[in-house]
Image (cartoon, helix red, strand yellow):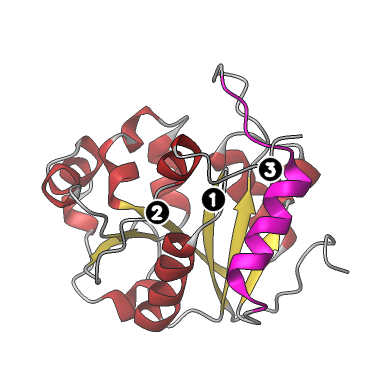
Amino acid sequence: MRNSFPVAQAGMVIGLLGGSFDPAHDGHVHITREAIRRLGLTRVWWLVSPGNPLKLRQPAPMADRIERARAVLRDDPRVVVTDLEARLGTRATVDTLRKLRAIYPGVQFVWIMGADNLVQFHRWNRWREIMAMVPVAVMARPGAGLAARLSVTARAFRWAEVARPEALGLREAPAWCFVNLPMHGASSSAIRARGGWFGRG
């Protein structure tokens, strides 16, 4: 079923790309396909998050965001769009990861995020636990490279940095790598600002 828990078997390496996807766009697709190619992932799951109670502005309805995400992916069989966090009842990434590891024993998960997220990753709830749980792939984003390299997280876990992206999925956490790739400038906030997203009910 399209909204049931995704199927995964022991030995698979699954990339997890979380976010509000409000809306999903070609930049998300670009990062995902580059991650599959460069990290040797079996699949990537998009974790379309529920609204963040700490933010004044809430995203478009979940159903609209999932529909848009599936549309921009154009039925890529390697990518699964999920509402797992809503189903698991989690809001913090660390709690989502803990539950997924319990549900899928033997599956290696890799957290995927843009370099702009690494800049403020140390503000995430129990960020050190996240780093200790799963390898992390940091995908290059326009204008964020230097700040990411100098971030609190990068400096705290410099010793755990992996030089070769293709080796990341084979490593035990903590392990992370910075993945250089062609830049894609698409932005959800920019799409919303110019009125290109009408998913809000």
Q: CA distance from mark 1 to mark 2?
A: 8 Å
Q: Amino acid at mark 1?
A: Gly
Quadrant for the N terminus, please: bottom right
* Mark earlier in primary sequence (3, 2): 2
Q: Secondary structure at mark 3?
A: loop
Q: Nearest the camera: 141 or 38?
A: 141
State left or right for residue 36 relative to residue 182. Answer: right
Q: Residue at x 32, y 78 (%)?
A: 167
Badge nearest the viewer, 3 or 2: 3
Q: Which mark is residue 113?
A: 2
Disc 1: CA contacts within 10 A as few (<14), some (14-19) or many (>=20): some
Residue 8 location (% of width, % of height) = 70, 75
- The magenta-colored residue range is 57-75
Residue at left 11%, top 48%? 146
Name the one closer to the observer, 130 or 189.
189
Against 39, residue 146 (above or below) is above
Q: Where is 42 relative to 124, above or below?
A: below
Q: Are marks 1 and 3 in contact (CB under 8 Å)?
A: no
Label 1 or label 3, whichever comes before in sequence order: 1
Given residues 174 and 12, the one toward you in this image is 12
Callout 1–callout 2 Cβ contact below 8 Å = yes
C-alpha distance separating marks 3 and 2: 24 Å
SS at circle 2: strand
Q: Is residue 116 visible?
A: yes
Is 74 magenta? The answer is yes
Residue position marked by numbered label 3 in the rendering:
199
Residue 106 visible within the image: no
Q: Residues within 10 Å of mark 2 (few under 14, many from 20)?
A: many
Give the residue type that dot 3 points to.
Gly
Q: Residue at x 34, y 80 (%)?
A: 38
Q: Give the residue number, with chain letter if any, for mark 1.
A: 18
Judge from the rendering whether residue 93 lies leftward or rightward of residue 198; answer left or right: left
